[in-house]
Image: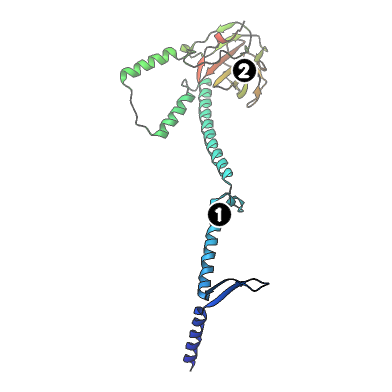
Amino acid sequence: MNTVKKKKQNNSFLKKLINSYKVVVSNEDTFEERLSFRTNKINIFFTLLVYSTILIAFTISVVFFTEVREMVPGYSSSELLNKAVFLTQKTDSLERELELNNKFYNSIESVLSGKTDQVIYKDTLASNNNYNELNQTTISASYEDSILRRYVEQEDKFNLTKNELVIENKMFFSPIRGEITQKFDPSNSHFAIDVAADIGTAVKSVLDGKVLFSEWSVDTGHVLIIDHGENIISVYKHNSKTLKTQNNFVKAGEVIAYSGNQGNLSTGPHLHFELWKNGTPINPEPLFNFN
């Protein structure tokens, strides 16, 4: 009996799903029939399912493929993403430039302190990095080519044109006035000129710049090194007193120290003045009036 009842109930449920219903749309006032159609519960279910699927797909497409997605909490805007990419690239380039500058300045400091005679040029560091990134095949120069290159480099090492000096149009201030007691002589590792001056004579910055180094050493007394930009560096040694510290900014013609006779390498009251361009010492005498 129970089995028969269950069968009747199941048949009754299926009939309800399959039974057709007439849906009529009529005018509320006149009851005039405007639209009518027949359907069943299964058709209505599938119609609602298809409609819901289309609506959900449309909503997802609008949210994820249009600018509406920027209104979703936690989702970054395209402008913000572009800025993040730009800042990342800029940070990488600045880190790379900072690394090159540190190696360049360390090389200059090593030469000035007498630890080594070899200068690591900034352009060479950059080209070496590019070479490593490209992973190119090494090309060896011939023996004759190496000799010729070495000869030309030695001949032009301290030539102004070799260093691409585009500084003749700058307004230089003479660091000090006095008689030149020792000239620029790279063959004897004297990469400067010595200008005789009484102890306490004002020493001035030749250009605007930033102090890279301000220390005292046994050999050279109080030393100042200033970065003037465009790979131009000036050096002032044997001072009796310095008025600037590291990272100070200075103006052209500003007094930065007082000359002296300090350091074991000093031969009398004078200023030891060096000028560097692109990592190479150059003769400052043609650029300044020391008299």
- Residue name at image x 49 percent, y 25 percent: 122
Disc 1 is placed on an element classified as: helix
Residue at numbered disc 1: 62
Give how far across and how far down residue 178 sits, in percent: 62, 7
Give how far across and how far down residue 164 sits, in percent: 49, 17
Give how far across and how far down residue 272 sits, in percent: 58, 13
Residue 116 higher or lower than 187, as above or below:
below
Q: Residues within 10 Å of mark 1 (few under 14, many from 20)?
A: few
Task: Count up the numbered dots.
Answer: 2
Q: Nearer the viewer, residue 142 or 66?
A: 66
Residue 131 higher or lower than 180, as above or below:
below
Disc 2 residue type (three-letter): Leu
Left or right, 168 with respect to 198, comes to left
- Residue name at image x 42 percent, y 12 percent: 155
Give how far across and how far down residue 96 sits, in percent: 51, 33
Report if the CB atoms under discs 1 and 2 are less than 8 Å apart: no
Residue at numbered disc 2: 207
Left or right, 289 with respect to 135, comes to right
Task: Using the numbered discs, state the Cα–Cα distance from disc 1 to disc 2 in whole angstroms.
Answer: 60 Å
Mark 1 vs 2, N-terminal side: 1
Disc 1 residue type (three-letter): Val
- Residue name at image x 60 percent, y 18 percent: 221
Nearer the viewer's eye, disc 1 or disc 2? Answer: 1
Within the image, what quadrant is residue 213 found in?
top right
Q: Nearer the viewer, residue 66 or 223?
A: 66
Q: Nearer the viewer, residue 147 or 36?
A: 36
Disc 2 is placed on an element classified as: loop
Quadrant location of the C terminus?
Answer: top right
